């Protein structure tokens, strides 16, 4: 089984700062996403799974409709595997309702002026994100015991929590440590990959202009996100 730990907004500098040795593995670095006009989650994961720059195609759908984009397995490198399991990946198997609820709460947070209301919404938003994270973590740890030849688990917690709480270093460190624990559980050959990282905008977080990768077997230097389909198929 080849395993991909796909983490939204895993930030290179925080992996180093919090010394997440399991996320780092033996070789690690930044990915090059400079071919994209902005680091957008849906664009980047779509480009990852198809091995092609899908920015134009996704942006054509518009800000709202882009979250409904879904690629057929035949358009992705997952098709090379006999029994792939892809958990919650945007553009493929992701739980639209859950992620819509997150975006609604985020919108509500920024559209109220009341501090009290903001605090309440942030608490709901965070609780929602942590609960979804626990669910995905269980699914992922379970799937590793199954007989899939390919497993990808997509974890959105660092992105979702980061957007509203990036200035809360205690909370961010806790999340990175938890993701590091998940990486520690992977005994199979695997790649850790993020679409983009995150930078501070006051107490909030915004996407940074590079992603993160790591492997135990090869230095990938400064790969593009569209290089991974070939790299992963080459691991078979
Ligand atoms: Zn984001």
Image (cartoon, rainbow, N blue to C red):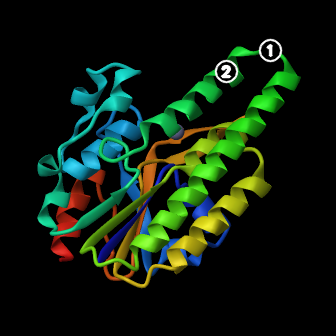
Asked whether residue 189 is in view, the answer is yes
Question: What crowding class fits label 2: few (fewer than 14 Cα within 10 Å), some (14-19), or many (20 or more)?
Answer: some
Residue 66 position, x and y percent, is: 34, 27
Q: Nearer the viewer, residue 228 or 69?
A: 69
Residue 46 position, x and y percent, is: 28, 43
Say which element carries label 2.
helix
Question: What crowding class fits label 1: few (fewer than 14 Cα within 10 Å), some (14-19), or many (20 or more)?
Answer: few
Marks 1 and 2, the one that precedes in the sequence: 2
Which residue is at 58% across, 66% downward?
179
**Residue under label 1:** 113
Q: Are marks 1 and 2 in contact (CB under 8 Å)?
A: no
Describe residue 21's horizontal placement relative to residue 41 as left or right: right
Report the Cα–Cα distance between label 1 and label 2.
10 Å
Which residue is at 77% across, 48% downward?
168
Vertical side of 191 occupied by 54: above or below: above
User: Is the residue indicated by label 2 positioned so its CB lies within 8 Å of ligand 1?
Assistant: no
**Residue under label 2:** 108
Mark nearer the viewer, 1 or 2: 2
């Amino acid at each position: 089984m080849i395993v991909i730990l796909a983490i939204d907004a895993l930030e290179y500098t925080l992996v180093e700062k919090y010394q997440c040795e399991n996320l780092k593995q033996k070789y690690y670095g930044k990915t090059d996403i400079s071919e994209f006009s902005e680091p957008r989650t849906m664009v980047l994961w779509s480009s990852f799974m198809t091995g092609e720059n899908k920015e134009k195609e996704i942006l054509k759908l518009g800000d709202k409709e882009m979250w409904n984009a879904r690629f057929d397995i035949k358009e992705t490198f997952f098709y090379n595997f006999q029994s792939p399991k892809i958990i919650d990946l945007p553009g493929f198997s992701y739980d639209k309702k859950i992620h819509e609820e997150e975006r609604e709460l985020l919108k509500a947070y920024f559209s109220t002026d009341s501090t009290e209301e903001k605090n309440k919404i942030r608490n709901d938003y965070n609780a929602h994100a942590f609960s979804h994270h626990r669910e995905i973590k269980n699914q992922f740890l379970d799937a590793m015991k199954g007989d899939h030849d390919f497993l990808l688990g997509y974890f959105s917690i660092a992105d979702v929590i980061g957007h509203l709480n990036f200035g809360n270093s205690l909370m961010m460190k806790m999340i990175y440590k938890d993701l590091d624990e998940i990486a520690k559980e992977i005994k199979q050959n695997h790649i850790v990959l993020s679409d983009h990282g995150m930078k501070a905008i006051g107490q909030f977080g915004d996407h940074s202009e590079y992603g993160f990768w790591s492997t135990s077997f090869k230095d990938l230097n400064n790969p593009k996100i569209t290089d991974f389909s070939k790299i992963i198929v080459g691991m078979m």
